Image (cartoon, rainbow, N blue to C red):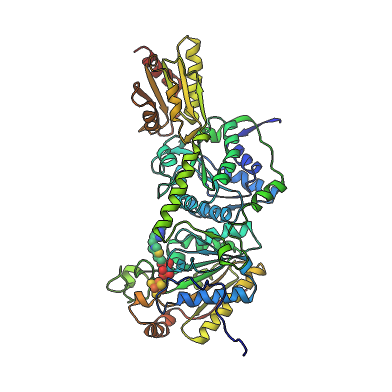
């Protein structure tokens, strides 16, 4: 298929449309305005619906409604707006409603900065709303990966009947890169997906108590609520098989960079530069940041490895907490951090890696 | 013998309502069920419940329903209706839900003229959480968070949602009814019918505001509650059609 030059936000929206997304609701916030703008042009062309919600709260709930009625649906925002969506996401998770949302994250906390950041890691992977639910969280490092992961996200969401989060950052969202777009699902395929949800979709059923659709974002009876959480936990455990990770030159590495998203991409370029100098550097880049590829860190030869370098655009470091769990104290972990909308500098990463190697 | 009345089949026989004795939520649920059956709409019904006592019947209605986060029913209904125009999408919300926490969603859906129906239960109080002040609580009326009663200087005045929405251009039908007398029950039923018909006709946003009782949190028995509606609630919330396009 032909390659086209696209901005990350628009590519994400186009990938969603190709995956059969036919409903989008969102509210303006930088740096992701191109997502709702693109959907507003594109969805009417394919018989879909775009709504500019009156807020992020309204938008996520419109998606909850559309997805509860069986349509592949999506919303997006950036950090402060994602915080507002958290109740709605929790409802979708509780009611087992498949939906996809994207966080094109920016500086925080508070209104933060409109420039790219990775300050939402804990929120994305540990507590995206009340109630302790979990989601698959996909973290692209290129526009192509953003496209592929968005396309796949709808399948994961439908398979599990659970929300899926695309955790990107302002760099991925606003950068233009050549991409190969996935196959456009035909109208028949999109209709078949919707048809397959008819038994549980809240759209009207024959008068029969047992057969009605009952979307339940909670339970009156404590045993039923516990059972729902136990079932959800089974699903979370099943994600082990879905882990995606880039392991790059790890086996003989004396220093391993651990990073996700745009920091992972910068980290990989550092590996290439330093390998040319004969330095043994590797990279572990989780693509699913949840489920986290803890086992990838077992592939490090700790008899040779002098240290791990956690690289992230967040102060304080957050991703490092998962790296610590994975490394289990087998070698020291340094950090290379920036924040506030500053983009990770390759030079800073090189310097930090050299410090480890020269130990 | 001729059968002149039977219970609506939209309420499941072996399930128990969670409503207190004398609560008019149950009256309205019955009316909705009767209308759905009479208009042959059960198979199309997609009900979005608010959070509050307005959601206590989720377990015993026999038609499709979902529960929205507190206040967000009109947004959830928007997503449902836009993607399934053939469904009959209606929300069932209390005054805390519709007129306080959900004000933005309610106003915006009305302003967009969403082709949905809102059944808005104005009982002047937060029922489920134990009688806190609602945006519709009357001046002087006691609430668990307004122990001296609602004071205008501190709390402002009761909100009149029909009249507020009447400032917008898009809504098709705005009506206020009650269930305090048999005649008013019949009027409420007819209003619900008309509101559903509007949706079938693609007319856009319709709202039936129903002035009801909450005997438990009003601290009145069901009969005195009827008197309270007549003497206190209805002068503040006059019944009638506010808009009919
Ligand atoms: C976000 C959120 N805030 C608060 C609550 C607690 N809560 C449950 S019901 C309710 C009030 C309901 O009052 P109303 O909408 O008037 O309905 P009623 O019970 O009177 O029918 C509140 C505040 C909640 N469930 N969710
Ligand atoms: S608390 Fe009030 S509104 Fe709730 S069921 Fe009882 S009487 Fe009805
Ligand atoms: Mg109330």
Residue A308 x/y as whole percent: 39, 22
Residue B237: quadrant of the picture? bottom left
Can the viewer see residue A266 in this picture? yes
Q: Is residue B243 visible?
A: no
Asked if A323 appears above or below A107 in the picture, the reply is above
- Which of B102 and A176 lies nearest the eye of the viewer? B102
In the picture as drawn, the residue positioned furthest to the left comes out as: B148
Residue drawn at (53%, 30%), measured in percent from left and top? A141
Between B209 and A22, the residue placed more toward the observer is: A22
The answer to whether residue A107 is above or below residue B13 is above
Locate residue B10, reporting x and y percent.
56, 72
Looking at this rendering, what residue extends furthest in the bottom direction?
Answer: B1
As drawn, is A275 to the left or to the right of A308? Answer: right
Q: Residue A171 appears at what percent x and percent y?
A: 51, 32
Q: Is residue A233 left or right of residue A47?
A: left
Image position of B20 (left or right of B34): left
Considering the image in quadrants, where does the C terminus of chain B appear? bottom right
B35, above or below A205, in the image: below
For the N terminus of chain B, the image quarter is bottom right
Q: Position of residue B119 (x, y in %)?
A: 52, 71
Instruction: State which quadrant residue A353 falls in.
Output: top left
In percent of the image, x 32 and y 70: which residue is there?
A: B153
Nearer-the-camera pick, B129 or B105: B129
Q: How many marks?
A: 0
């Amino acid at each position: 298929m032909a390659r086209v030059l696209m901005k990350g936000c628009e590519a994400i929206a186009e990938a969603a449309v190709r995956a059969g997304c036919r409903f989008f609701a969102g509210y303006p916030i930088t740096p992701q305005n191109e997502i709702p703008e693109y959907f507003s042009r594109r969805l009417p062309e394919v018989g879909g619906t775009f709504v500019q919600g009156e807020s992020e709260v309204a938008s996520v709930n419109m998606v909850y409604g559309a997805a509860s009625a069986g349509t592949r649906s999506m919303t997006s925002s950036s950090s402060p707006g994602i915080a507002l969506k958290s109740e709605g996401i929790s409802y979708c998770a509780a009611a087992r409603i498949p939906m996809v949302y994207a966080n094109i994250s920016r500086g925080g906390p508070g209104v933060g900065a409109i420039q790219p950041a990775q300050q939402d890691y804990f929120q994305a992977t540990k507590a995206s709303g009340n109630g302790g639910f979990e989601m698959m969280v996909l973290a692209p490092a290129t526009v192509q990966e953003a496209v592929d992961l968005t396309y796949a996200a709808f399948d994961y969401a439908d398979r599990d009947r659970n929300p899926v989060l695309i955790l990107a950052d302002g760099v991925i969202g606003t950068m233009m890169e050549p991409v190969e777009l996935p196959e456009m699902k035909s109208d028949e395929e999109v209709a078949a997906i919707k048809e397959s949800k008819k038994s549980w979709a809240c759209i009207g059923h024959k008068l029969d108590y047992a057969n009605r659709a009952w979307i339940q974002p909670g339970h009156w009876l404590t045993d039923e609520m516990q059972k729902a959480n136990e079932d959800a936990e089974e699903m979370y455990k099943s994600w082990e098989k879905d882990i995606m990770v880039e392991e790059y030159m790890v086996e003989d590495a004396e220093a391993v960079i651990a990073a996700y998203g745009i920091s992972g991409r910068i980290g990989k370029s550092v590996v290439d530069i330093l390998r040319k100098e004969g330095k043994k550097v590797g990279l572990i880049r989780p693509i699913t940041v949840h489920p986290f590829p803890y086992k990838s860190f077992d592939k490090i030869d700790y008899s040779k490895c002098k240290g791990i370098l956690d690289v992230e655009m967040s102060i304080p470091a957050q991703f490092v907490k998962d790296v610590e769990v994975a490394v289990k104290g087998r070698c020291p972990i340094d950090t290379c951090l920036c924040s506030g909308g500053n983009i990770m500098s390759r030079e800073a990463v090189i310097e930090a890696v050299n410090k480890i190697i020269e130990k | 013998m001729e059968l002149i009345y039977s219970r609506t089949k939209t309420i499941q026989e072996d399930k128990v309502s969670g409503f207190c004795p004398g609560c008019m939520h149950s009256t309205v649920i019955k009316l909705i069920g009767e209308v759905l059956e009479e208009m042959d709409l059960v198979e199309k019904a997609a009900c979005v419940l608010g959070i509050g006592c307005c959601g206590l019947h989720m377990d015993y209605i026999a038609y499709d329903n979902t529960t929205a986060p507190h206040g967000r029913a009109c947004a959830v209904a928007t997503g449902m209706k836009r993607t399934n125009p053939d469904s009959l999408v209606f929300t069932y919300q209390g005054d805390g839900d519709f007129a306080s926490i959900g004000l933005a969603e309610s106003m915006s859906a009305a302003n967009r003229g969403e082709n949905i129906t809102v059944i808005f239960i104005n009982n002047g109080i937060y029922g489920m959480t134990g009688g806190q002040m609602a945006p519709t609580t009357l001046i002087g009326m006691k609430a668990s968070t307004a122990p001296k009663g609602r004071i205008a200087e501190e709390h402002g005045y009761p909100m009149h949602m029909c009249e507020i929405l009447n400032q917008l251009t898009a809504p098709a039908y705005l009506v206020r009814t009650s269930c305090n007398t048999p005649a008013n029950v019949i009027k409420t039923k007819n209003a619900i019918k008309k509101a559903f018909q509007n949706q079938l006709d693609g007319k856009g946003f319709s709202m039936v505001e129903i002035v009801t009782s909450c005997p438990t949190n009003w601290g009145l028995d069901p009969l005195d509650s009827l008197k309270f509606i007549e003497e206190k609630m209805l002068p503040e919330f006059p019944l009638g059609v506010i808009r009919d396009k």
